[in-house]
Image (spheres, rainbow, N blue to C red):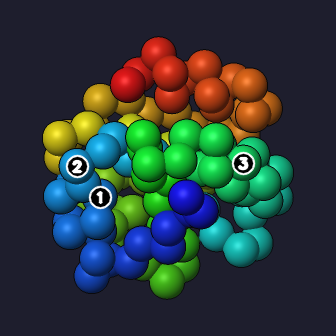
Amino acid sequence: MATVAVTDATFDELVKGSDVPVVVDFWAEWCGPCKQIGPALEDLATEYGDKIMIAKVDVDSNPNTAAAMGVRGIPALFIFKDGQVISNRAGAAPKAALKSWIDESI
C-alpha cells in the first residue's frame, strides 16, 4: 500500500477510524528533513502492506489537524491504534530506525 494523503476533512475518518494502526507524518513541501524521510516512509508503506497505513498530512494545506495534535516542528510522526495516539516522535531518522520504532509501537 502506498502512503495516503490525509486532510483536515478526512483525518478523523481515515486515521482515527482505521481498522489498522496508522503512522501519520506531518510534513511540508519546503521541509528538508521531511523530504529525507519521505522515500523511507514510501518503502515502509509497501513493506507493511495492509498491516498498517502510512498517512501524510501537509501542514501548510491542513493546519487545523497539525494544531490539534500540538505539532510545533516537522517532520512529526504519530502512531495511532484504535483511534488513539500510542507513540510519537519528531525529526528525521533513517529507514531502519523508523521501522524499529513502528515495530516496537504496534
Instruction: Give the x, y percent position of residue 104.
Output: 47, 16
Decide which of 68, 37 is in the foreground and name it.
37
Instruction: Give the x, y percent position of residue 77.
Output: 50, 44
Q: Identify the residue under disc 1.
A: 15
Q: Check disc 2: other Cα within 10 Å, few if <14, some if 14-19, many if 20+.
A: some
Rounded to the nearest angstrom, the CA distance separating label 1 from label 2 is 9 Å
State the SS at label 3.
Answer: helix
Amino acid type for the residue under numbered disc 1: Val
Q: Identify the residue under disc 3.
A: 43
Instruction: Give the x, y percent position of residue 35.
Output: 78, 59
Amino acid type for the residue under numbered disc 3: Asp
Which quadrant does the N terminus fall into? bottom right
Decide which of 66, 9 is in the foreground and name it.
9
Q: Identify the residue under disc 2.
A: 19
State the SS at label 2.
Answer: loop
- Closest to the camera, between mark 1 and mark 3, is 3
Nearer-N-terminus badge (3/2):
2
Please give the name of the residue rendered at 38% of the width and 77% of the height, measured from the top-left corner. Answer: 7
Give the total number of marks visible in the rendering. Answer: 3
